[in-house]
């Protein structure tokens, strides 16, 4: 397969500012390091040090708590003393502790684990230095990406290493119930939140007041995951606004002059949960969090997980952010602070800020060599119907694709000999990819046939064992394709649209833009794309596509496809599984949603249709089976008016707008037919290297 030289220049970052903080640990005493004198920088240097007990007392005695207790006492006919006792119990459930001795000894354990399982922990030290110089005058919120349970630990570990106060981190209440682990997390500054509490006014008030007290009085950063949960697909999730709105309320109501929000990205060469995530995406429910489950997971620490990358983005001053959007916060100056609530305009600004945080996380991510390997192998499957590649060919393709994706703005950790980097990547992922003696590269069978699953707990269709055998490893591979899509999605949308132009093959920029908008609208939930940025993203994607010879400008000022057919095919292929899943979903909705149907039924039927399509050759990739993708498809179809979402109590129902759904379905049929594969391939003929997979 030939390579295509990319011309032009790019402004991509390099890895020079990253340092491996495990290197020193491999050559000096861990005990001496963990027990050293530690004087961390605080968010506000001159603030009086507060302890967790002070925070709880401040919440209990706040005017807002007094007001809500007075209100609920009258509504429910309950004595205020009873409600105060309930508040105290909730604060005991929520509240964090700060036991530095526990932090130190857990840090020692984490150091030993990291040195055993990871080759490097790469941290952008220039970004850390810049962050520390900006701290000391205003509250700070850390907003890391969330790809693994390890994110909690790594954030605290990095802060300890660089003498930054250990953040108070919001954790799900599930962890609190874990024997011993709940206590250890709490002692390491975790505070706990229930998964749902919008209907409980007292708990909502107590929790929001707790968060705001940490912001106003605390001397440590407050940390939360803006995506709300781990991303099983390794793509960014649509941000949740609730926690951020709570945290910013003290600023918006004039209690503090500013808040700094720091987007953080933690990227993994390989994640511990890769196999479990594939099962979850196929509908197998995740195991409940438990200490025994954690102990079992420690068995996986005998394997190697390569490099971890942590980068801290530019701190966002909320005051400056609102000024740049011509927003004033004077509306709260007329009444008591504890009676204030955020306006619709303020919530709208918080939504934009939330998307900006996620966008920043994406921009500072780091791609490992295996991310590129995954794209090339996946593309080979969709183009040629096989994974069969020789190592020499794979290395050549990775080198080519690296030059392309760096032009698109990605940071790739490949230096020196590309073959050495690829071999190291394959070694880290040897549980998924086999390097054969003849130099061939082959995907492994990792599903355990006959694995018992409680069908009553399935979130989707009960897939056949044969389907699971092929789908699980392919979804594991797709997990490493997905982080590249933050850089490829917009150029891929334009390329896909331009594959279906009029016979002349030419189009004006103004006529291309609405077609791009239509595709982007369908994928906006999949790739977290805010509507206000669509024209800017469109122009930037066109600029890059011009650099790589995908799009050319004719003498008449029109746009046409260039001669880089190889890259055109790859860009169409990366979006194909999503379009295929959405098409199956649209066809399912047309059949079953003439009347309102529950979400689970719709997802089950869509999965069943995709499974049938895989067998017949109509669907080319099992990523279309992903419940995560199908759920994004439902949201997209709601946003374009093809279906209507109805809530009846706790149940979510969908009913089709058949006329609009037909238009969308026809458009998806066109997009699916245009992907780069030249022939249908047989799902049954996909060859996997047979090994003895570990049990789930």
Image: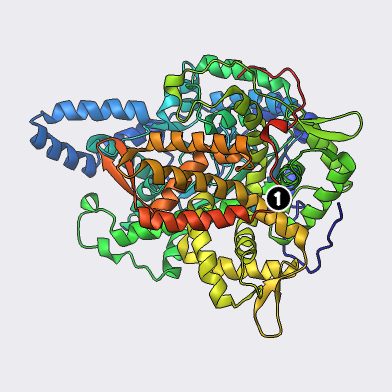
In the image, what residue occupies the spot 47% across and 38% down? Answer: 606
Q: Relative to the observer, which residue lies in front, 338 or 620?
A: 620
Question: Can you give x and y, in whole percent of width and height, for residue 487 in the image?
Answer: 64, 56
Q: Relative to the observer, which residue lies in front, 40 or 524?
A: 524
Q: Is residue 235 visible?
A: yes
Give the left or right position of residue 336, taking residue 595 as reference. left
- Tally the numbered discs: 1
In the image, what residue occupies the spot 64% across and 72% down? Answer: 503
Question: Can you give x and y, in whole percent of width and height, for residue 146 in the image?
Answer: 54, 40
Q: Relative to the observer, which residue lies in front, 259 or 446?
A: 446
Q: Is residue 219 visible?
A: no
Q: Residue furthest right?
A: 438
Give the left or right position of residue 623, taking residue 689 as reference. left
Q: Relative to the observer, which residue lies in front, 126 or 493?
A: 493
Give the left or right position of residue 59, taking residue 311 as reference. left
131 up-or-down from 180: above or below? below
The colour mode here is rainbow
Q: Which residue is mark 1?
A: 677
Give the left or right position of residue 210, taking residue 136 as reference. left
Res 71 quadrant in image: top left
5 up-or-down from 126: above or below? below
In the image, what residue occupies the spot 46% across and 15% down? Answer: 179
233 up-or-down from 1: above or below? above
Question: Can you give x and y, in whole percent of width and height, for residue 131 in the image?
Answer: 59, 52
């Amino acid at each position: 397969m030939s390579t295509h030289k990319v011309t032009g220049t790019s402004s991509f970052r390099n890895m020079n500012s990253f340092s491996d903080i495990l290197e020193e640990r491999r050559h000096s005493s861990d005990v001496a390091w963990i027990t050293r004198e530690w004087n961390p920088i605080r968010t506000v240097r001159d603030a009086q040090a507060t302890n967790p007990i002070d925070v709880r007392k401040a919440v209990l005695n706040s005017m807002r708590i007094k007001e809500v207790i007075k209100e609920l006492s009258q509504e429910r006919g309950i004595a205020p003393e009873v409600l105060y006792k309930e508040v105290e119990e909730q604060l005991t459930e929520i509240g964090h502790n700060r036991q530095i001795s526990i932090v130190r000894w857990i840090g020692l354990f984490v150091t030993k684990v990291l040195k055993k399982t990871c080759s490097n922990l790469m941290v952008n030290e220039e970004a850390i230095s810049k962050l520390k110089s900006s701290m000391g005058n205003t509250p700070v919120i850390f907003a890391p990406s969330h790809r693994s349970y390890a994110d909690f630990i790594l954030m605290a570990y990095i802060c300890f290493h660089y003498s930054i106060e250990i953040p108070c981190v919001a954790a799900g209440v599930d962890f609190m119930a874990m024997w011993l682990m709940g206590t250890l997390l709490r002692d390491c500054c975790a505070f706990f939140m229930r998964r749902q509490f919008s209907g409980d006014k007292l708990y909502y008030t107590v929790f929001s007041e707790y968060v705001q007290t940490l912001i106003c009085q605390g001397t440590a950063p407050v940390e939360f995951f803006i995506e709300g949960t781990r991303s099983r697909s390794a793509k960014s999730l649509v941000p949740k606004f609730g926690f951020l709105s709570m945290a910013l309320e003290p600023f918006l109501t004039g209690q503090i002059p500013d808040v700094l929000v720091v987007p953080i990205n933690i990227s993994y060469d390989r994640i511990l949960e890769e196999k479990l995530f594939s099962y979850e995406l196929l509908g197998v429910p995740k195991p409940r969090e438990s200490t025994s489950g954690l102990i079992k997971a420690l068995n996986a620490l005998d394997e190697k997980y390569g490099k971890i990358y942590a980068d801290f983005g530019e701190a966002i001053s909320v005051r400056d952010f609102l000024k740049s959007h011509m927003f004033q916060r004077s509306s709260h100056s007329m009444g008591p602070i504890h009676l204030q609530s955020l306006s619709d305009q303020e919530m709208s600004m918080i939504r934009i800020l939330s998307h900006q945080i996620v966008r920043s996380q994406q921009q500072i991510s780091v791609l490992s060599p295996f991310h590129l390997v995954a794209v090339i192998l996946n593309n080979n499957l969709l183009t040629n119907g096989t994974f069969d590649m020789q190592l020499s060919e794979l290395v050549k393709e990775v080198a080519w694709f690296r030059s392309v994706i760096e032009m698109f703005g990605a940071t790739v950790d490949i230096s020196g000999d590309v073959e050495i980097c690829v071999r190291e990547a394959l070694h880290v992922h040897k549980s998924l990819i086999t390097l054969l003696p003849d130099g061939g590269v082959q995907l492994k069978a990792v599903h355990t046939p006959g694995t018992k699953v409680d069908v009553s707990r399935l979130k989707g269709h009960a897939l056949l064992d044969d389907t699971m055998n092929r789908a699980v490893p392919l979804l594991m591979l797709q997990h490493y394709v997905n982080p590249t899509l933050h850089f490829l999605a917009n150029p891929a949308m334009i390329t896909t649209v331009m594959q279906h132009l009029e016979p002349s093959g030419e189009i004006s920029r103004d006529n291309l833009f609405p077609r791009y908008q239509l595709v982007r609208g369908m994928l906006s939930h999949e790739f977290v794309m805010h509507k206000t940025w669509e024209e800017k993203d469109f122009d930037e994607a066109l600029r890059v596509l011009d650099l790589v010879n995908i799009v050319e400008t004719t003498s008449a000022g029109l746009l046409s496809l260039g001669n880089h057919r190889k890259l055109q095919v790859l860009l169409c292929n990366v979006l194909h599984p999503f379009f295929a899943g959405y098409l199956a979903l649209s066809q399912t909705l047309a059949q079953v949603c003439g009347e309102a149907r529950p979400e689970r039924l719709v997802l089950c039927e869509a999965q069943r249709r995709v499974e049938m399509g895989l067998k017949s050759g109509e669907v080319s990739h099992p990523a279309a089976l992903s419940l995560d993708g199908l759920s994004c498809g439902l949201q997209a179809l709601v946003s374009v008016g093809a279906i209507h979402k109805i809530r009846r109590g706790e149940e979510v129902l969908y009913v089709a707008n058949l006329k609009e759904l037909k238009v969308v379905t026809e458009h998806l049929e066109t997009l699916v037919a245009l992907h780069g594969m030249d022939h249908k391939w047989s799902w049954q003929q996909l060859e996997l290297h047979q090994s003895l997979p570990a049990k789930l």
